[in-house]
């Protein structure tokens, strides 16, 4: 092991400098505002300029936003002085074996705690379970177009391999190096200094209100998802927890899109 690697490990073992409230909100702002602009400004433009369905224009715009989140994550890591070695990035984002909160020791069996959180996530995803609190936002968003990618489930896209390719890109940037990486990997480990033991709750709130591109689900769905992803990530000190729970949604989507493209069902 070189002296540089030894120094890097020593630095990573030191207490992490926590973010200020101003920096936390700035990261939230620069990740969420572009998504809202992309969702409601770009699709009509693409529909006119490229003769694309509004839904496809929305999808392309959101992918651009997700790629931007990865770029934003890299910018933040660079500002934090994090080495861009793969091992350093993983340590910084807490992508490690879950840690027993009582003993402080990593234990792979703790991944079994994913099961109840995945079940809760599925209950939320089914819908019509939680109170329809989005009614409070309705007067402010009623004139905004509502995009639902599940409407792609038609025979029109059978054999459309580009749809499958676009979903794979979405899968990578949404669940692995986009949303999840930024909110649970970059932000969550740095929020304790401001929010203390409620940092996971604050992270969930930020994640919920980040969904400016889907304002109709912020209160009824996105907030709850934020809590389900953030709590086990914090409690077990492992970014893998939130990533796996969130990523399962993506794998379900991949199965659906694959079935459409292959003409199954």
Image (tube, grey):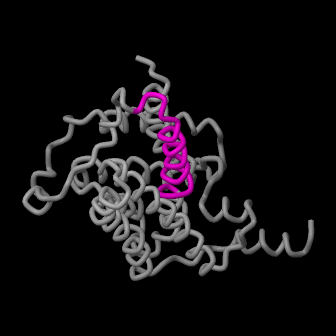
Residue at figure coordinates x 46%, y 75% from the top left: 193
Instruction: Please tell me whether residue 160 belongs to the stretch shown in magenta.
Output: yes
Residue at figure coordinates x 42%, y 54% from the top left: 60
Q: Is residue 240 above or below residue 111?
A: below
Residue 263 position in % (x across, y down)? 45, 21
Residue 226 position in % (x across, y down)? 37, 53
Give the residue furthest to the left: 139
Splitting the image into 4 quarters, where does residue 207 fall?
Answer: bottom left
Q: Nearer the viewer, residue 180 or 39?
A: 39
Please identify the quadrant where the N terminus is shown: bottom right
Q: Nearer the viewer, residue 186 or 102?
A: 186
> Is residue 126 something one can see in this rendering?
yes
Q: Nearer the viewer, residue 147 or 123?
A: 147
Please state the extent of the stretch shown in magenta in the rendering: 157-180
Direction from residue 126 to residue 245 in the image, left or right: right
Residue 68 position in % (x across, y down)? 49, 66
> Predominant secondary structure in magenta?
helix
Splitting the image into 4 quarters, where does residue 4 fall?
Answer: bottom right
Direction from residue 114 to residue 5 in the image, left or right: right
Instruction: Please tell me whether residue 263 belongs to the stretch shown in magenta.
Output: no
Residue at figure coordinates x 40%, y 17% from the top left: 265
């Amino acid at each position: 092991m070189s002296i540089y690697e030894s120094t890097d490990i020593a630095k990573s073992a030191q207490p992490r400098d926590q973010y200020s409230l101003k920096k936390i909100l700035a990261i939230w702002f620069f990740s969420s505002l572009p998504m809202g602009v992309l969702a409601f400004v770009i699709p009509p433009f693409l529909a006119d300029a490229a003769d694309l369905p509004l839904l496809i224009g929305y999808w392309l715009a959101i992918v651009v936003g997700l790629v931007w989140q990865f770029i934003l994550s890299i910018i933040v890591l660079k500002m934090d002085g994090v080495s861009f070695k793969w091992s350093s990035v993983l340590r910084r984002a807490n992508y490690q074996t879950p840690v027993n909160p009582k003993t402080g020791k990593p234990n792979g069996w703790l991944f079994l705690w994913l099961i109840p959180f995945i079940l809760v996530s599925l209950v939320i995803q089914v819908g019509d379970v939680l109170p329809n609190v989005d009614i409070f936002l309705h007067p402010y968003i009623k004139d905004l177009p509502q995009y639902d990618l599940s409407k792609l489930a038609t025979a029109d896209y059978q054999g459309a391999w580009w749809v499958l390719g676009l979903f794979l890109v979405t899968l990578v940037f949404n669940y692995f190096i986009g949303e999840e990486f930024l909110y649970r990997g970059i932000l969550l480990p740095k929020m304790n200094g401001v929010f203390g033991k409620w940092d996971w709750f604050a992270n969930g709130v930020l994640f919920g209100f980040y969904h400016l591109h889907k304002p109709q689900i912020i209160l009824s769905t996105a907030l709850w998802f934020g809590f389900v992803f953030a709590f086990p990530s914090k409690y077990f000190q492992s970014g893998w927890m939130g990533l796996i729970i969130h990523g399962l949604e993506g794998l379900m989507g991949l199965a659906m899109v694959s079935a459409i493209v292959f003409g199954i069902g």
